[in-house]
Image: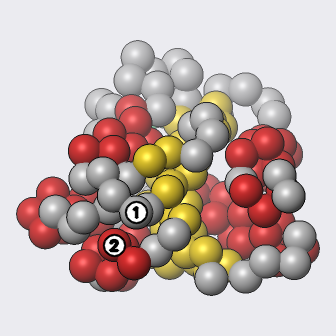
Amino acid sequence: MIKVFYGTESGNSEMAADDIVELIEDAGGAAEVIPMEDADVSELSGEKLIIVVTSTYGDGELPETTQPFYDALKSDRPDLSKVSFAAFGLGDSTYETYGNGIDTVSALLKELGASQTGETGRHDAAKTLPLTDVVSTWAQSTLPIFQD
Ligand SMILES: Cc1cc2nc3c(=O)[nH]c(=O)nc-3n(C[C@H](O)[C@H](O)[C@H](O)COP(=O)(O)O)c2cc1C
């Protein structure tokens, strides 16, 4: 069961996470969506692969529901050395701090020992590409289930 954690302010990241779960299920895998604010970070050490999805708010800051996940990781510091993660970020390139949110979360996961699989996916709200299409292209080029 691949856990897809999302943090959001206005729901776009949740839609992206839902799309990722659907794509994995369509490919014959099993996945579930978990809001970051409901995540138990002490259980992450036992995961093989997790997917993190977050937007950026404020001036390059984490959205409200990503912050508690980040804070819990920062204080509990689980050993993630056996964990791989894939990362997808939502932002708006008219901000100087484009996509900071996912980069902040990814940096902490790496600091805790996790290794990233593939490139960070990015949806830019300033461009007209539909979120679903960007998520789909990223997932198919990044997630191990599509490489088999
Ligand atoms: C008040 C506000 C501040 C934002 N600040 C940033 C930012 O600093 N950097 C960025 O890349 N995007 C920024 N965005 C764009 C959002 O990340 C983007 O709209 C994203 O799709 C929102 O996803 P969400 O609904 O999951 O929160 C901002 C949006 C708003 C409304």
Locate residue 13, reporting x and y percent. 57, 57
Residue 46 screen position, x and y as percent: 39, 78
Q: Is mark 2 within 8 Å of ligand 1?
A: no
* Residue that numbered label 2 is attached to: 45
Q: Are marks 2 and 1 in contact (CB under 8 Å)?
A: yes
**In the image, is residue 124 above or below residue 86?**
above
Q: CA distance from mark 2 to mark 1?
A: 7 Å
Observer-nearest of 128 and 76: 76
Residue type (three-letter) at the residue carrying disc 1: Lys
The picture places residue 93, in percent across and down from the top left corner, at 55, 22
Q: Secondary structure at mark 1?
A: loop
Query: Dot 2 lies on which element?
Result: helix
Q: Given the image, on which type of amino acid does mark 2 rest?
A: Ser
Q: Nearer the viewer, residue 34 or 126?
A: 34
Of label 2 and label 1, which has the lower sequence position?
2
Q: Of tags 2 and 1, which is closer to the observer? A: 1
Name the residue carrying label 1.
82
